[in-house]
Image (cartoon, rainbow, N blue to C red):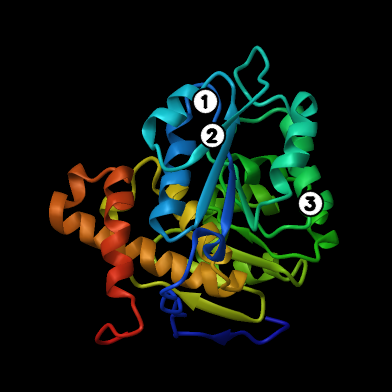
Amino acid sequence: MAMELEQIDAIPRLAPRARDGHKGRYGTVLVIAGGRGMAGAAALCGASALRSGAGLVRVATSTEVQPVVASFEPSYMTYPLPSGEDGLIDFLGSQPIFERLVEPADVIAVGPGLGQSDDLRGLIRFLIQEVDRPLVLDADALNLLAGHVDWLKCRSRPVVLTPHPGEFARLVGTEVEVVQADRVRHAAELARIADPVVVVLKGQGSVVTDGAHYYINATGNPGMATGGAGDVLTGVIAALIGQGLSAFEAARLGVFAHGLAGDIARDHHGEVGMIAGDIVDSLPDAFAHLTPDADGF
């Protein structure tokens, strides 16, 4: 490898909450997610951000699925965006709304259940090139970015990419087997495309890297191989950025806490029957174990 990588083992900490704290001190997360048949992805991402300490969560989603997304969780706000005949967000029709939504956001998570279209590719380009907020890109946001990773070179604010191996292979134009053969090297090479990029290459021993340093996660279990688990992680990382951690810190703590929540859920439900909602429900216990006073942390 042309550039030497330093392995990081330490897990960042969230500072204890101030007694006079209020929701404005803990970050406003904007989630852009969900389309026809994928309301649950948007809901899981929004709920996990709340369960990871975000002060305020707004979920912007297709008009078609907004009532369903709202029904999952009363503690986040939902914003219906114009949708096309395919049930997906109509970016061109929604752009004035987006410009109002991104202004109060401290961090934006985009991609879970979003769907794919040329119009939505325009949304991803707009967010990367025009929006001066930290971004967490997952799922369909990554698929829409495939072939256009050079867009990231214009970024001055952090962006966290959270691909599973298949999404990673599409992003960089290779095969999954190639990626899996040297996960750290490939993740670091992608992170080096621009200084504010952090890559989370998911899977057993998720790799987190900023291109100069890397961390390999040890929490989690096979029961987390279930639909929606990645959407949960997206919300966790976004919430931690909103609370003031750097992108690299938030990604490291995020994968650790997400995996720990999965381990707690396994202990209650077993690996076979675990679903993504169980991981969301276990996040409070995971973060309770990760307080600065917790033994062994």
Residue 170, percent from left and from top: 64, 47
Residue 78 is tagged as: 2
- Of the residues shown, which amino acid type is indicated by label 1? Gln
Residue 26, percent from left and from top: 52, 64
Q: Earlier in the sequence, mark 3 or mark 2?
A: 2
- Of the residues shown, which amino acid type is indicated by label 3? Val
- Give the class, few, some or many, for how many residues have Cα within 10 Å of label 2's Cα (few <14, many ≥20): many
Dot 2 lies on which element?
strand
- Of the residues shown, which amino acid type is indicated by label 2? Thr
Q: CA distance from mark 3 to mark 2?
A: 20 Å
Q: Residue at x 55, y 66 (%)?
A: 25
Q: Is residue 175 left or right of residue 233?
A: right
Residue 131 is tagged as: 3
In the rendered view, tell whether residue 96 sits above or below residue 8. Answer: above
Judging by the rendered image, the residue that carries numbered circle 1 is 66
- Label 2–label 1 contact, CB within 8 A: yes
Q: Is residue 147 left or right of residue 217?
A: right
